[in-house]
Amino acid sequence: MDPAWIPGRYPCGPVMPNPAPFVEHQKAVTIRNDVNIRKESLRLEPDEGNSSHFLISFSFDATVSGSVTIYFFAKEGEDSILTPVKENNPAPLTVNFEQGLGQKFKQPSGTGIDFSVFEEPELLKVGDMDVYPLAVKADASPGNHDESDRTPASGSTNSQITQAVFEKEKGEFRVKVIKQILWVNGMRYELQEIYGIGNSTEADLDESDQGKECVICLSEPRDTIVHPCRHMCMCSGCAKVLRFQTNRCPICRQPVERLLEIKVGSEE
């Protein structure tokens, strides 16, 4: 009798764990953004010359000259073109700007919004929506682009669109940004936050600061983002090994769909 066989049992080899699902590893492609609105600076200010009216203000950076257009209740269409949809809207306002970092924008007096003429649910609307109560479009002047930066099929200006709703806090309206979109060379990109990228880009941090190091090897700088949770927590070396061993984020343990390597520092 085979000693490996016992009545009532069947011989079998060692139980092998199921292999982890393969996770795709990609490298990021750099896209030039000529104008950036700092979304955390977007706010409402009272129009001192018109009671009950409010003006939009924000800070922005521009590596080229261009223009900013303010829309109220606008719908985004083909090629990221914004179209107002309400008859009692303030007309879209366009203001030109010059090249420069850390610039301040504020609507001219008399061009703001009067919340009293709108139903409150319209102003506070969130969720699945085509029309945003506020949209700010920053366009880079076409003449500032090299021909190599543009595709013949695009036929449009490179721009950034910030879409927002209004929220009410302690009886006062505030701006809440929902999304930001880049339109570059005829392609539309939706911007997303990256958690942990701040620690990786702050060059003035002390070398002993653990906040910018890979959470796995604790030695190399973080340069890989986990999707869809968007945690930037690993170096590319550890990410390439990890993707064959597990499909869980080291930070939040959510399933990983893909890994994106991005170089955020200056390369030597």
Image: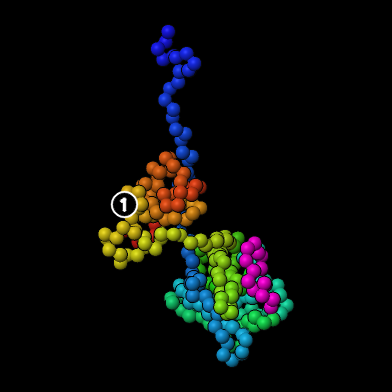
Residue 138 at x, y = what percent? 55, 73
Per the image, label 1 sits on a secondary structure element best described as loop
Furthest toward the right, the residue is: 87
Furthest toward the bottom, the residue is: 49
Q: Quadrant of the C terminus?
A: bottom left
Residue 57 vs 241, above or below: the answer is below
Question: Total of numbered circles in the picture?
Answer: 1
Q: Which residues are magenta?
A: 118-131
Q: Nearer the viewer, residue 104 or 127?
A: 127
Question: Would residue 203 be found to the left or right of residue 27 on screen?
Answer: left
Q: Nearer the viewer, residue 191 or 172?
A: 172
Residue at the location (27% across, 60% down)?
207
Residue at the location (37% across, 46% down)?
238
Residue 1 at x, y = what percent? 42, 8
Q: Nearer the viewer, residue 151 or 194?
A: 194
Residue at the location (41% across, 49% down)?
250
Question: Would residue 116 be found to the left or right of residue 259 on screen?
Answer: right
Q: Which residue is mark 1?
A: 218
Q: Quadrant of residue 89?
A: bottom right
Q: Is residue 144 visible?
A: no
Residue at the location (49% across, 16% down)?
8
Q: Quadrant of residue 28?
A: bottom left
Residue 104 at x, y = what percent? 48, 80
Residue 194 at x, y = what percent? 46, 60
